[in-house]
Image (cartoon, rainbow, N blue to C red):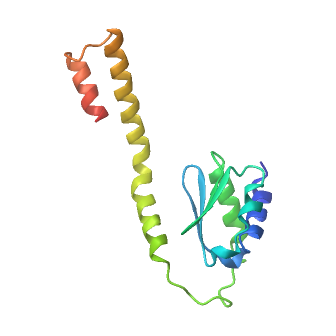
Amino acid sequence: MDYENTGRQIIDLIGGPGNIEHIEHCSTRLRLSLYDNKLVDKSALEKLPGVIGVRVNVQCQIIIGKEVADVCNALKKLVAGKQTTGDRLPTRKKWGAVIVDFVISVFQPLVPAIAGGGVLKSLLIILDMVGWLSKDTSTYKVLDSIGT
């Protein structure tokens, strides 16, 4: 994937660099806080190579997958210095965007730990079912408490 070219196309389809208030990403999605979500050409964004899907609610979320960090970095480089503040009045962030940003920032670091705990619990159940590790052993109890 050509990250810079993808970034340019995304900028064009969301209303230009002046429409971008904030850029960030999670593990699979490019999250854009825009001044005007009505400028987003959702159907054209969905047709871009490498874009899995697009959701426009409080934020414009472009689902890219594992290459999202590279696309985000390219997008930030392309936008740097191209945003003009003179043609836009400073706006306060919408409450919905503030809440979404807060929830994401709180729970995103916990996702790997929660997933790891779930995998550990599943393995313990399988090991008990096949008879390799009994629920009565101290090893099982320790691993079970770690998974919780």
Relative to 145, is 135 above or below?
A: above
**Residue 116 in the image: x percent, y percent?**
40, 35
Total marks in image: 0
**Residue 137 in the image: x percent, y percent?**
21, 16
**Residue 57 in the image: x percent, y percent?**
56, 67
**Residue 56 in the image: x percent, y percent?**
61, 65
Q: Which residue is drawn at 66% across and 59% down?
A: 73
Relative to 11, is 143 above or below?
A: above
Does residue 18 appear in this view? yes
Q: Which residue is drawn at 39% across and 48% down?
A: 110
42 left or right of 56?
right
Relative to 111, is 23 above or below?
A: below
Does residue 81 appear in this view? no
Front position in the image: 53 or 117? 53
Quarter assignment of residue 30:
bottom right
Relative to 42, is 48 above or below?
A: above
28 left or right of 110?
right
